[in-house]
Amino acid sequence: MRSRLFLAAVAMAAGLALAGSSRAVAQGCCSPGASPLGTLVSGFPAPGRVQAGVLFEFYELDRTRAGTEEVPDLADRYSRARRAIPYVRVGLPARLSLLVELPYEDRLKQLRFTTASGNRFGLDIENEGFGDLSSVLLFRAAPAADLAPWSLHVGAGVKWGTGRSARDGIPVELQNGTGSNDVLLAMSGHRNFSVTGVSAQSVVRLPSKSESGYLYGKELSLGAALFLAPGRDWSAGLETRHRSAGHDAFLNRRLPNTGGSRWLLGPRLAANWRRARLAVEVLYLFPVREDVNGTQLAVGRQMSFGLRWPS
């Protein structure tokens, strides 16, 4: 019964992902609408206990696509995003926990042009600062016991519009925040076997319109990992992540070159340093499929490095 419940949850998350991608609906990685995903795998602390950690993420957009095809870019655009996401997870009574995270982000976009006479000139736009605060209340739906080889957590929260979202001279995708309070729906689970394990996480973001009239597309983030755990202190595996989002709109007008979907895949390593009560995770992902609406920059790679101090 337990295994069937966990597999049903994973199937539901996969179904959400397929529904989103079939409608060709993903914000570029550098948009401020990024949902929390990596911090969902930090475990479930007992009541009154606290987990703290920080997740470092790096995204690079080094190619231009029209739909699924890579195309030349007259502006020779390049973009990257770096984020440090400190988070705290507090164990509460009644099988609840509260996850709070506040990212600090540095985003860059470069444009390079060549004139008819062969002269080159360019423009660099960079923005740095705190992003939007997110808080999610999670419920351990199963099992009832604290210790088990499997678990399923569901929850809901808000991405608060705390980040600066109207800095002059900065395009929308490089702003620190969205300027809106968005609903978050989250789910995570894992199942350990004798020498292997699987985990899955998903976050749905339902944006609201900002005061300026900008509305981001609905967003889905999904992650799943298969890992080998030969010892108690380290594991290695393979992880895939999906992100999709609908078209953005401004003043009720749909913006054509926004939204799309992508699947990333790559190796994952994790280790526990018991003496220091420290957990470490490293992830390297590359695109296996990207489908953007209109013509947009696309992701070339994603790297993540996480540190967690267990409760």
Image (cartoon, rainbow, N blue to C red):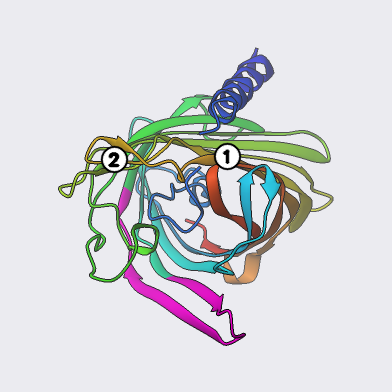
Q: Quadrant of the N terminus?
A: top right
Q: Please report whichever mark, 1 or 2, sits nearer to the chain's N-terminal start.
A: 2
Q: Which residue is mark 1?
A: 261
**Which of label 1 and label 2 is nearer to you?**
1
Q: Nearer the viewer, residue 257 or 272?
A: 257
Q: Residues within 10 Å of mark 2 (few under 14, many from 20)?
A: many
Locate residue 144 relative to residue 229 in the image: left or right: left
Locate residue 72 relative to residue 184 in the image: left or right: right
Q: Which residues are magenta?
A: 107-134
The spot of residue 153 in percent (x, y) is: 49, 31
Q: Residue at x 34, y 48 (%)?
A: 48
Instruction: Report helix, strand or loop for mark 2.
Output: strand
Q: Quadrant of residue 268?
A: bottom right
Q: Residue at x 54, y 76 (%)?
A: 113
Q: Residue furthest left?
A: 211
Whether tag 1 and tag 2 are in contact, CB under 8 A, the answer is no
Q: Which residue is mark 2?
A: 182
Locate residue 224 relative to residue 307 in the image: left or right: right
